[in-house]
Image (spheres, coloured by chain):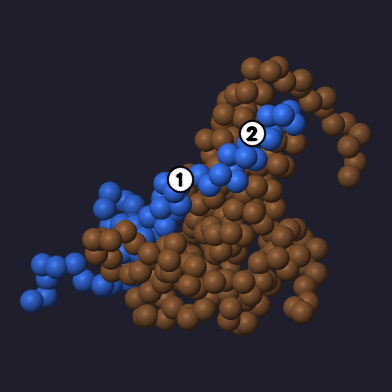
Chain colours: A brown, B blue
Amino acid sequence: MGAETAPPLPVRSPDEKRAFKRELTEVVPHLRAFARGLCGRPDMADDLVQETLLKAWAAQDRFEPGTSMRAWTFVILRNAYLTDMRRNRFRGDYDETVAERVLTAPAGQEEPIHLSDMHRALLTLPAERREALLLVGAGGFSYEEAAQICGCAVGTIKSRVGRARAALTTMIEEGNIPDRAIGDPQAHRAILEELDEVAAGNGRAVATR
Amino acid sequence: MAGGKKTKRGDAPKTGGKPSDPEWAAGLKRLYDSVVDEPLPDTFKDLLSKLDSAG
């Protein structure tokens, strides 16, 4: 796209590159957590994080030292996720057994709900609400930071988080959690339709196979 | 009877202007934290060291 007036990128010193890599390394666990919340399957989530790391490394000259590495890499991860989703990568692949094993609460913890229920419920939310809730409710980002990551207004994020919270509360209190969030064609279609909107304005419907 | 214990309700009580979290909110946070606390798989260590030689 028209890059006529792109400012020259700064040349990074070896020290700066080292600092970049240190910070990048530090955010990997957070990237994994965000990715897993987004796409459900640990293996796919880790693939997504690896893709994110490579992209972040390639784009490191665009990172402004002193700003949030976590927020910067979350943007990259989010974009990679949306692209991959549209390319059919995560479709129909939610593995409940894996999720159950990975997400089960630590022994001895009494929980009003199981984490696997929590995750399934989360995965039924439209992508834009799910990511907003993950960023604010789990990742600890402020509404302002989440808005920057998602490229939308703060009010939009607040509204998405509010709707996500309301939906989850209803789902969980009414015991209305779908058996298989991603495997359910209807839930899946809804997610993909939302993704088409989120993923950048060319709302091309993606055919399922 | 109507009282002492916390009941399951949609309209959580407010504390200090901020709506208090529903029961699942802690679960959501733990879902995230449980992944953050996992040891990093070797594939990531390998990748990160490859980045060094690439850079």
Along the line of sight, the residue nearer the viewer: A90 or A156: A90
Q: Quadrant of the N terminus of chain A?
A: top right
Q: Chain of mark 2?
A: B
Q: Which mark is residue B25?
A: none
Residue assigned mark 2: B49
Asked if residue A189 lies left or right of residue A95, the reply is: right
Residue A94: % across, % down: 57, 71
Residue assigned mark 1: B39
Same chain? Circles 2 and 1: yes
- Please state which amino acid type lies under the numbered disc 1: Pro
Q: Chain of mark 1?
A: B
Along the line of sight, the residue nearer the viewer: A97 or A198: A97
Asked if residue A86 lies left or right of residue A128, the reply is: right
Residue A184's place in the image compared with B38, above or below, is: below
Asked if residue A74 lies left or right of residue A109, the reply is: right
- Please state which amino acid type lies under the numbered disc 2: Ser
Residue A179's place in the image compared with A76, above or below, is: below
Distance from Cα at disc 2 to Cα at disc 1: 17 Å
Residue at left 54%, top 72%?
A95
Residue B53: % across, % down: 72, 29
